[in-house]
Image (cartoon, coloured by chain):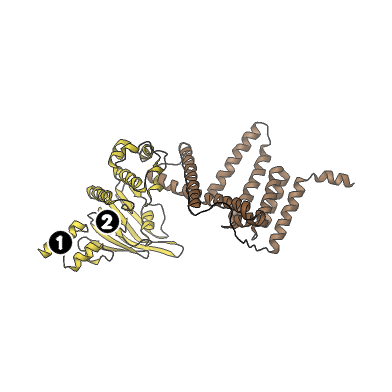
Chain colours: A yellow, B brown
Amino acid sequence: MKVALEDISFSRGPFTLRGSGTFDAGVHLISGPVGSGKSTLALLLAGLLRPGGGAIRRDGVSSALLLLQFPEHHITSPTVAEEVRSWGLAPDDVLARANLSARANDDPFHLSRGELKRLTLACTFMRNPDLLMLDEPFSSLDCTAKRMTCRMIEERDAGITIIFSHERAVLPRVDTIWEMEGGTLTALGSVPGAISRWRHAPPYLAYALEQGARPENIRLSDAQEALCRTQG
Amino acid sequence: MQDPRLRLLSTAVLSLAAFASTTGAVAALIWWLVFTPRTKALPRPGVLLSLIAMIAVTALVSWWGGGPGVSYLVRMVAVLFLAAWAYAETEEGEMLAVAVWALGDRIGFEIGLIAEMGLTGLAVIRQDIDQIQVALALKGIRIGARSIVPIAALLIVAQIRRADEMARLLVVRGYTLGGRICPLFRTDSRDILASLSAVILGLLSCLPVRDVFILLQ
């Protein structure tokens, strides 16, 4: 199972996105500053935009799903329960997972953005597609919900998961790191080797590297463990 | 047409003429062909065809019931083309400028503000429809007869919510009644020619011209 970007290019006004590379099974993190082109790449990978040049080829991928950055853009139904049904899912399980069981009959727009994000995240993970693309999955979430999202990502035991995020505090265990800057996608390689090349690494990882530690992965706990090993 | 006052006048006169009679509608369509960028000012083919289809269905029902179905189709298509042109040419702030120029800083400002908010709302609805199409595609739902009613309800609720938010924002910023702006307009000779033609065509198609000539004889 893989998704290959073959010298794709996409232009909108003065902005041009370019990228090449292969996403194999596992968890991929595409990091980069706001406005660097992450969401545009997500839309291209999901097939919602067409590249102006090059091609995107899917091999062995039978289902794909993109979680949009703004959860309100997913809403197509007048109640929370109907919204879950519109994803082809049973409301009880999803609402329990999103901790929203008491809000089944509410208007989805009456949920806070954080609650709405929890709802769309729960729907996305319950669908369990082969190719799961998460555009800024941690935005609007508190620390507890961010950690829960990390757990859901890590518990996916098959398929390709691509995370597009500028999050620099709470991150899941990943297999590969990519960077997006000025519309250009760069593959940094597999973790842990890619961590030292990661220019947008969160401060705790940068500190660990400065201290001579070599974290096994990109989570805060990985940096702490590496520091403990180094400093004894 | 650069001058929004003349554009609004031409649109109003020709729309009335088109609505009043088939002759007026034909005259309005001829004016539209001569003085507008024609197809460049029309909405996307999908949107345009949907609107024409809705008019055609109503016309068909009218014709089936013994009413003036074909005439209704021609008249409403002419009104639609004029409205599409006026909407495409209108720039942000022009409705407010025209309303203040015509009715002053209090009532004019209020009416202009409402018109501006209405036009902005149309653009936002277009974005909402695009977003809903993406959401439905991601969920694997095809847009059909069953999904039209919930989508329409969603769009209406979203618009009411935005209007409420906008009203609260205006209150928070201290808005009570009216405001002052100094509208500036640019008019060229083509604007005058087009609007003069519109008024003449409007008058000719609304007045009982044959009766006038009989009186002259």
Q: Residue A226, which numbered label?
A: 1
Q: Residue furthest right?
A: B217
Q: Quick one: SS at disc 2?
A: strand
Amino acid found under the numbered disc labelled 1:
Ala
> Which sits in the foreground, B86 or B95?
B95
Left or right side of B31 for A137: left
Q: Quick one: SS at disc 1?
A: helix
Q: Residue furthest top?
A: B65
Chain letter, disc 1 residue: A
**Residue A118: x %, y % from top left:** 32, 46
Q: Residues within 10 Å of mark 1 (few under 14, many from 20)?
A: many
Place residue A116 in its image quadrant: top left
**Residue A210: x %, y % from top left:** 19, 68
In the displayed structure, would residue A171 be above or below residue A129? below
Amino acid found under the numbered disc labelled 2:
His
What residue is shown with label 2?
A28
In the displayed structure, would residue B180 be above or below residue A72? below
For image coordinates 61% across by 37% down, the residue present is B58
> Which sits in the foreground, A56 or B94?
B94
Chain letter, disc 2 residue: A
Viewer-nearest of discs 1 and 2? 1
Q: Earlier in the sequence, mark 1 or mark 2?
A: 2
**Residue A136: x %, y % from top left:** 33, 54
Q: Residues within 10 Å of mark 2 (few under 14, many from 20)?
A: many
**Residue A99: x %, y % from top left:** 29, 41
> Which sits in the foreground, A80 or A68?
A80
